[in-house]
Image: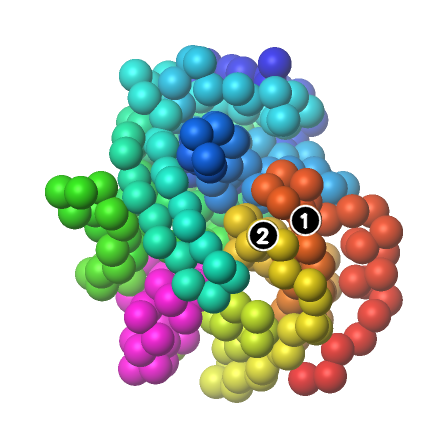
Amino acid sequence: MAHNQNNNELISQTPLDYLIIGHVTADLVDSKVFLGGTATFSALTSLALGMRPGIITSCAKDLDLSPLEHIWLNNNPSPHSTTFENHSNGVKRLQYLYHRAHPLGVENLPSFITPPKIVHLGPVSNEVDPTILDQFESSLKCLTPQGWFRTVDKSHRVHLKAWEDAETYLGRADVAVISEEDVQYDEKVISKLASAIPILVVTENVKGARVYWHNDARFIKAPEVKYVDDTGAGDIFATAFFYRYLTTKDPWEAGRFATLLASWSVKRIYLDSIPLPEEIIRAKMEFLSA
């Protein structure tokens, strides 16, 4: 079992390097249930990168969390786990949301003796209160806001919407990673978001990613790979970027590193896509042409 702790328990053991806050999910694929969600992919990626990760989440007690057995986990139990069904061809995705676990707010945070080096808010279904950022003044505050851009219709299908408070909360963070799809490919929205936060990264699927920093933008082209499954690729990208930026303070280098690891991840399926040790070493050494 993953290491569970009750809410508001004071943590006295080794401090966390990487804290991800968001729902782990039950992902339906061909009538089978797979553990997913940004929280899952980001925690496992940060673990692979040599960090000590932790998750604050909400899910049902019957969800199999065994893949997270080496990760500190704080679960606010819910009658249902957040449950998605995804259909993707590597370019477009059709998504359904059938259940949603309890939302996560400031009241769900335990007390940390030493703040995590990185705090990552990773909502998947509008479940995370962005004011949580205010509780971690000394941490690198990171966002993957995709869940704040989502709404669900009566048939459970997920649709994109505007994130009304985007500029307000981006101003409280240090780094955010979004996809072109999150903002419906609207360049005006991207420009507004980029001006609201020190570093904004916009992923462009198989093409690569744009990094905005200090009124400058650079495009990083992704290498060509054989596509198998892109589930979690965006989360792997974001986590790799946050990690590399923390260690190098260079967003261009972080973008290059993240682009490589995310590109290689789509050659494998689901949790097998987590970066391998040899890939991490290679990504730290290999160069991409911008």
Q: x, y percentage for residue 139?
A: 54, 48
| Residue found at the very far front of the displayed protein | 30
Of the residues shown, which amino acid type is indicated by label 1? Answer: Arg
Q: Are dots 1 and 2 in contact, CB under 8 Å?
A: yes
Residue 168 lies, in percent from the top left, at: 28, 61
Residue placed most toward the observer, 191 or 273: 273
Q: Is residue 208 left or right of residue 6?
A: right
The answer to which quarter of the image holds residue 96 is: top left
Q: Which of 96 and 71 is in front in this view?
A: 96
In the image: residue 26, left or right of residue 71: left
| Position above or below: 103 against 165 | above
Q: How many marks?
A: 2
Neighbourhood count class around disc 2 (C-alpha, 10 Å): few under 14, some 14–19, many 20 upward: some
From this view, report whether residue 65 is shown above or below residue 24: above
Q: Is residue 279 visible?
A: yes
Q: Residue at x 53, y 49 (%)?
A: 231
Residue at 16 percent of width and 47 percent of height: 153
Q: What stretch is highlighted in magenta?
A: 167-194
Give how far apart the Cα atoms at labels 1 and 2 are. Answer: 6 Å
Q: Is mark 1 on a helix, strand or loop?
A: loop
Report the side of 287 relative to 36 (left or right): right
Inspect the magenta stretch and tell me whether residue 176 lies in it.
Answer: yes
Q: Which of 51 and 240 is in front in this view?
A: 240
Against 117, residue 168 (above or below) is below
x, y percentage for residue 182? 36, 63
Q: In which quarter of the image is the C terminus?
A: bottom right
* Quadrant that contains the N terminus: top right
Magenta stretch holds residue 240: no
Q: Name the residue under label 2.
A: 229
Neighbour class for label 1 at 10 Å: few (<14), some, many (≥20)?
some
Q: Looking at the picture, tell me which residue is in the foreground, 62 or 74.
A: 62
The residue at which mark 1 appears reads as 268
